[in-house]
Image (tube, coloured by chain):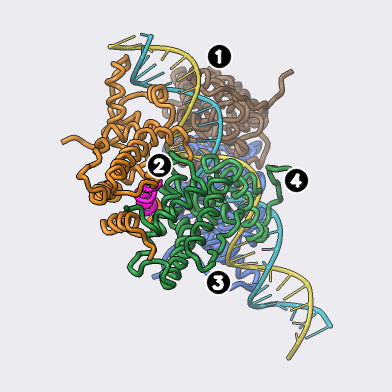
Chain colours: A brown, B blue, C green, D orange, E yellow, F cyan
Amino acid sequence: MTRPAEPVRRGRGRRPADEVRREVLRAAGKLLLDEGMAAFTIEKVAALSGASRVTLHKWWPSKGALALDGYFSVVAPIPAFPDTGDIATDLTTQLKAWIRLMDGTRAGRVLLELLGQAQTDPELMAAYRERNSGPRRRMAVEALERARHRGQLRGDVDCEVVVDQLWGACYHRLLIPDLPLTDEFAEALVANLLAGVGP
Amino acid sequence: MTRPAEPVRRGRGRRPADEVRREVLRAAGKLLLDEGMAAFTIEKVAALSGASRVTLHKWWPSKGALALDGYFSVVAPIPAFPDTGDIATDLTTQLKAWIRLMDGTRAGRVLLELLGQAQTDPELMAAYRERNSGPRRRMAVEALERARHRGQLRGDVDCEVVVDQLWGACYHRLLIPDLPLTDEFAEALVANLLAGVGP
Amino acid sequence: MTRPAEPVRRGRGRRPADEVRREVLRAAGKLLLDEGMAAFTIEKVAALSGASRVTLHKWWPSKGALALDGYFSVVAPIPAFPDTGDIATDLTTQLKAWIRLMDGTRAGRVLLELLGQAQTDPELMAAYRERNSGPRRRMAVEALERARHRGQLRGDVDCEVVVDQLWGACYHRLLIPDLPLTDEFAEALVANLLAGVGP
Amino acid sequence: MTRPAEPVRRGRGRRPADEVRREVLRAAGKLLLDEGMAAFTIEKVAALSGASRVTLHKWWPSKGALALDGYFSVVAPIPAFPDTGDIATDLTTQLKAWIRLMDGTRAGRVLLELLGQAQTDPELMAAYRERNSGPRRRMAVEALERARHRGQLRGDVDCEVVVDQLWGACYHRLLIPDLPLTDEFAEALVANLLAGVGP
DNA sequence: CTCTAAACGAGACGGTACGTCGAGTCTTCTA
DNA sequence: TAGAAGACTCGACGTACCGTCTCGTTTAGAG
């Protein structure tokens, strides 16, 4: 049994740079998942990791950058998009998995908090897009375009828009929790969009 | 010509409560629109409005609450939903207007920053939902249900989901600016959803 | 029996300004006398006094200013010059007393360290002159001028120069301890100067 | 035309020890005269000289030691005491020259700052005495003793005390600039002491 | 019309965090 | 193998903002 947040103390001289980096990222990720972005502090990361504040400032330009790096050092990478040949199934599967991640785990909540901070922190926004939203969007768009070539979508459809109408809808319910985010919601999203809601 | 951010100085004694409130809200709103949420500080609002920090803490429980109150004291109220009888037209009109507000004005940017802060501030989130997203969603849902009763939407459609697939898609592009937010985007959203993107 | 360096903890709100000032000065003086100017730190004074660093920065513009204020809050004020009617006696008495203070006590050592710091800190120098060297010089000069009027010194003597040749000589041995500072030294200073060292 | 404080960059490997020493001292002296002791930093000396901080720490035990070494590598050595046969003339000449050095040049100011630092740095004090005050005092004492043997001073005079009453008086006015340091002051010092100030 | 209670401002204070600087230490690499 | 490069910890500094507290003042409302 290890004590959870024991502040590390250590001698002065140099340590291997990436050993330090690794410990800092672990500490940052842990702090983020344990206490959320509101309580995430450079000072606490330093204390937890045994690194000095100066070192953190050296390697990470801002609090947001450190948080995001810490996040991705602790959380599993983005899973590949399934491809069963049926776009409706694949979209529903992927949406449900994503919902489970975002709505059901600490990591999901934290990711939304990071996105929130990114609204007032351009560097964090850039990093968020590059490391999270970008790849996800790309994978979804590619799957949709494959489906279009297979004739499962109309030829004139803008797949980027479709992504916004699926994942954006989920983001909506995550960021503004007026309504719950369920599997049925995911299914309705896909159904609405493929068949249309018109008469 | 008045100097823009002149710090107010005033005598000591008691002043009418709502005069104080009014001036504080004006100052808060102005500061918010001028410098954004990142630079929004209780201290600055106090200095700008001539009120004391204690008074602000008394009337507003948190920075977020004050910011949101200030925001709505300065920004125009939510406009009513048009009703021409054609739901496609009405949705497109309303979406375009909203896009113009959110993507084209300082106020829109600030609202997104507030939503961002709300991810780590439950009170702010509650206020945001009550004063902004809630009414908007309600109005859109009502318009959609009217359309459904008119037979312009299928009878089994969940209008709440449709709202997510329209406004949520826009929020998506606002909060994660991977792609631009254009009038064509609004039109595509409505078209996709009404006619479906399937073959 | 009071524990010596117990760090004080206290609630948040305001305390009477001069209560804080008093405690800070006591702590500063104590720290100065206990550990000397080299170990004198704003941080330590804050911890020792229970005040916050911010408060110290508010009231004292620099470390030197705080140190000097702390010094004089702990050390006895400058004693008056004796006046027996015989200038030789009075000078010797006063010099010996001063030597005893400067060379025999912690306070004297500290005062020299302050003067040392003042060589690279103009504000500290100004304060030192105003609160220590100035009054001492003035009192000595006045005693000498009284003696001149009594005919105990030649009429054309510049008393300021005489002060430098007495106290300055002592400062010399204090600041550059090549040779010891004894009562005989004080007597020799007065004798040399009154009778001359020429043949 | 060379820029004055250009930081040197150089490859990694070893360089001859005394080449390093020489460059370090030059850089230290230059920095000291250019910016004074308050801005004198091991870090800056390293950057300026192209040596590593470790090397500096290896050769010089403290900042003060480095500063003093740097000082004497740049400033002219102590001039010999004149000996015209007339002690009054020689003393006055020497005092005036010293005053000109100490009060009129950057080097003099820096020397006083070093003496100031020496009040809280015993190693620096030891070095200062050995390399500056000691030789000066010795030369002056020897000149005075020659004069005493020539009969120009009374036989029972302690020449060390006389030195304190001349140079110490000047130090007094240098270290505590209450009054200016002029040629007339130097003349008065000698006159007072040789003829006495008594009636 | 007076008196009092409530609210306000001014200002100060402790606390947390930030970003920076310089010192001293340690390791790795190079000439 | 001595020196350089570079990274790291540590202690301290000065600043910003927060939330709290006291004090003196002013006004609204009760008597």
Which of the 4 quarters of the picture holds residue E16? Answer: top right
Q: Which residue is mark 1?
A: A84
Please give the chain letter of the residue carrying mark 2: D
Q: CA distance from mark 1 to mark 3?
A: 71 Å
**Residue D158 in the image, given as x and y percentages of width and height:** 40, 45
Task: Kindly check if marks 1 and 4 are in contact, taking CB atoms under 8 A apart as contact.
Answer: no
**Residue D64 in the image, given as x and y percentages of width and height:** 41, 34
Residue A67 appears in the rendering: yes
Which marked residue is nearer to the observer: mark 1 or mark 3? 3
Task: Kindly check if marks 1 and 3 are in contact, taking CB atoms under 8 A apart as contact.
Answer: no
Q: CA distance from mark 2 to mark 1?
A: 83 Å
Which marked residue is nearer to the observer: mark 2 or mark 4? 2
Q: Which residue is mark 4?
A: C2
Assess disc 1: are there few (<14), some (14-19) or many (≥20) residues with their C-alpha within 10 Å of its C-alpha: few
Q: Is circle 1 on the same chain as circle 4?
A: no
> Of the numbered discs in the image, which one, if any, rests on residue B10?
3
At x 60% / y 70%, what residue is drawn?
Answer: B19
At x 63% / y 69%, what residue is drawn?
Answer: B18
User: Secondary structure under badge 1?
Assistant: loop
Q: Is residue D170 magenta?
A: yes
The residue most toward the left is D1
* Amino acid type at image mark 4: Thr
Q: CA distance from mark 2 to mark 3?
A: 53 Å
> Of the numbered discs in the image, which one, if any, rests on residue A5?
none
Name the magenta segment's main secondary structure.
helix
* Amino acid type at image mark 2: Leu
| B78, above or below D7, in the image | below
Please give the chain letter of the residue carrying mark 4: C
Q: Which residue is mark 2?
A: D115
Q: Which residues are magenta?
A: D160-173
